[in-house]
Image (cartoon, grey):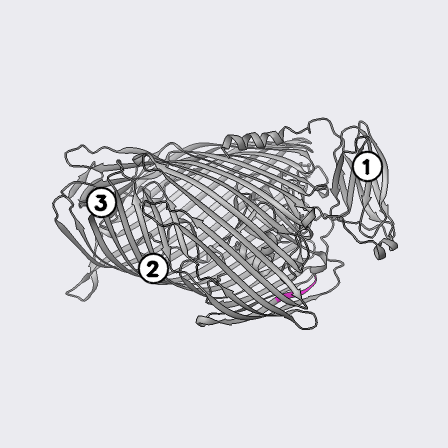
Amino acid sequence: MKPKHLLVLLFSFLSLPGFSQTFPVTGKVTDAKDNSALPGATVMLIRLPDSARSVSITDNQGTFNFQPAAGQYLLRASFLGFQTLQRRVVVADKPIALGNLALQVNTTALKEVQITERVPTAVQKGDTTEFNAKAMKVNTDANSDELVEKVPGVVIQDGKVTARGQDVKKVRVDGKEFFGDDAMATLKNLPADVVDKIQLVEEQSEQSRLSGIDDGNRNMTMNIVTRPDRRNGTFGRVMAGAGTDERYQAGGTINIFKPKRRVTFLGGTNNINQQGFGMEDFLGGGFGGGRGNRGSGGFGGSGITTTHNAGINYSEEWGKKITLSASYFGNYTDNVGYTSSYLSYFQPELEKKSEAYETEEYGRSNTNHRLNARFEYKIDSANTLFVQPRLSFQLNNGFSNAADSVNYLASPVSKSGNNTSNDLAGYNLGTEVIYRHQFAKRGRSASVGVNLSSNENNSDTYTTLDGETYNFRTGEITYIDTDRFMDRESQGFNMGTNLSYIEPLTKTSNISLNYNYNINQNDSDTRTYDYSEADQAYTSLNRSVSNTFNNNSFSHQAGLGYNYFNAKVNFNARASYQYSELDNQRLLPTERQMTKGFVRFIPYASFQYRFTRSKNLRIFYNGNTQNPSLDQMQDVLDKTNPLALRIGNPDLDQAYQNFLNFRYTAANTEKSTTFIANISGSLTQDQIVNNRFVNNTNDTIFTIGNFFADTLINRASLSRAENLNGNYSLRSFVSYSLPLKFIKSNLNFDLSANISRTPGITTPINVGEPIKSINTFSYSQNYGAGVTLSSNISQNLDFNISTRGNYSYAYNTLSSSQKNTYYNQFSRVRFNWVIYKGVVFNTDFTHRLNTTVVEGGSNINYLMWNMSIGKKLFKKQNGDIRLSVYDALRQNQGFQQNVNNNYLQETQSVVLQRYLMLTFTYNIRKFGNGSGNAPAPGERDGMRERGRFGPGGPGGGPGGGGWNGGGRDRGEF
């Protein structure tokens, strides 16, 4: 589907009626016996005489809200086990408050009536889309990831969770921190049978939430709302398994939930590539001499990984004022593997083909300790204090044995062998503190925030390089032989402060002032020593590949904003002025002082319109800057790889990105349909890219312009950062889901289209020709479509069938006739069946098809089949013994594709293949009385107090975070 068609589709939905004048009809559904609220009751408003219907599900306080136009209506309230109540309602020219609608218990219905009414799949609550777990049945012992996989617009693939085309950065449980930023760890360790609702929202930063000023930083976040009857008890599982080829796994998770306190213990060990923690546990530094395994679009899990981990998560509410959560995770991984890569470089003419072959054998280990905490203290009704400390410590070590060869015009250019070993230790320490005060005047507030962090990394690296280059014109061979030790020490400190103030203008508007100051200090000392044959040690300092510097930077940013809000509209606009400065003092290899300043005007705007309770449009614009890194600005020649030199550019400007996003969501609770559309675009000015100088002459080059005076041998390259305009990208995602009642299943369709243009520059140095740069553009188009059929039959029969295809088209103007098209298809069939008396059968088929992106490459087409059969044990069937086979057809493959400005790349790697495993699992389920565990008044599913999963807003009124700035009862959402 072309982008213009997606735009037409989106705005055709936006043209739906909704602008006529409406009047709120509110009320509360209660139990007539004790007048207690009935959350989850169904309230239907039927317009007379055409019978058009609107449906609302009451919140945790039993309240509902409609926005009908003037006319006559029939209101019908119903709840399982109660008699249905009907009332005639006439809407004229003012709001209608119906008060309590008391339902009588229907004892006969409880005994005799079989419920066949379908549970609504989703409801829209302001910014938050909420999905009902009851509408997506899975096996009783399933994990939450199998349930979430059935949510419309959510995709779980290769250990990554995406929603509406965006990466899910965090998964919370009842609004509380759980397993840090590792979404899959949360979903894998939380049983599906404790889940009541699944909420999706683009979450604001803590600073925005408390200050009431939207800074434009949002991340797609998922919140798991637990069942009220599962909030008081102990649950989890322990398991152990042994298999062929010495494969094993063992571990467990224990959750102890109390009304005010929750503790989770976990631990595990395995050698079957199950990690269970996020990428934040892996410190940079890396290994490897080649580019293998650096591409994107990969799958299969490179290498064989052994993992040991343990952790604890704790959260507690101390009274009504203090909320504390903390977690510790320890993790050790050991990964060994082998990769082979093929690269095809873009050339000015197609027949001038340059290609490279690389292989790498590697081993890498990582030890990580991570501690996070979150403390929020509501001092009184006017003052709030938030503190979030964090600490992590990592140890990395590994080795890499790599070999590569480069050909040009089918003739050899170079070949080399690179052996590297690395040891690295580092820590990151930080804390964020925010204080907020609300003044006596309604809507007036101020906040101050401070964010401190420091880090230190130390590494030792040994590298040997044995290579040779060929002059393809003269046949001359140049030999390269290096043996080096690099000692690197670096320290960093960062401090950011934020001051904000909100002054109300009217009941529906305010102005905001904010000021930010940030300072960064980084010191780095990298000293490289060549091996001395005389001393039999690394004693000879090589200044050309050593670097010592002190780098300081700071920025000031001041902004003025205006906010308008009412029951349907939320509009924010802000203009900011930013001044930033970089100050670098280089000590080695040569001394130099460099200072550079940047000035930028940064606008921001957000518009949100709520057509109805379940239909929501949000338009968002933001501008942001990116300063060049120190490596990009330092005019120090990096000769680590003699065939690929690098040098910085002190004249770089900062890049500036304009970002625009449209999002429309609609959930029809009566028909259980959900529609989501998301379109975004970005335009970047002064993007920082590398200019690649390539020596095509017969001779060694000693000077290029006024920035290079060294040695560039034949067919070697020199990269230098420069600013270029012309970068843009367009992304769109549309999802529609509906129930298939005749097979008790849900069907979801999604479409996506991504288009991008990336500027580049290359400078071939040819014989007898002046040096002249060639500006290029890399174009990429990707169109995708997917369909998912998920069952809602019973806990004994559960299936999920999905397929998703992506067609991609890419080319570079440097070789415009070399246009590359490729197609990726991912299909999966997952089927679980409790056959008879606890006999369980599970099968999982995954098919992958990837066509090659390089000339002469091979297509990837394989079917991976996992299967198991087991038996439930014990009286409560909480035990499970199961025999499983992984990759039964022995077809699993590791494969990656990468397309960038300079080359096309395909990488294949060794992966885990077929094995059998016998596993015993024991599920722990012990729950107390669920009463008293529902969210406290004023909360919504544990998220109310944080204001995260409500509609958000400027925070203009007391209490903040409400959709209209606190001037409206937030419980209606």
> Residue 415 colored magenta?
no
The residue stretch that appears in magenta: 232-236
> Residue 233 colored magenta?
yes
Image quadrant in which you'd find residue 67:
top right
Image quadrant in which you'd find residue 599:
top left
Identify the residue at horizontal 45%, vertical 72% (top origin). 246
Mark 3 to mark 2 CA distance (whole Å): 36 Å
**The label number, if any, that marks residue 97 in the structure image:** 1
Q: Earlier in the sequence, mark 2 or mark 1?
A: 1
Reading the image, the residue beneath label 3 is 408
Tell me the element at label 2: strand
The amino acid type of the residue labelled 1 equals Ala
Q: Position of residue 684 (x, y in %)?
A: 42, 34
Q: Is residue 655 above or below residue 880?
A: above
Q: Is residue 661 above or below residue 787?
A: above
Query: Split into 4 quadrants, where in the image is the C terminus?
Result: top right
Q: Position of residue 512 (x, y in %)?
A: 58, 34
Q: Is residue 180 visible?
A: no
Reading the image, the residue beneath label 2 is 459
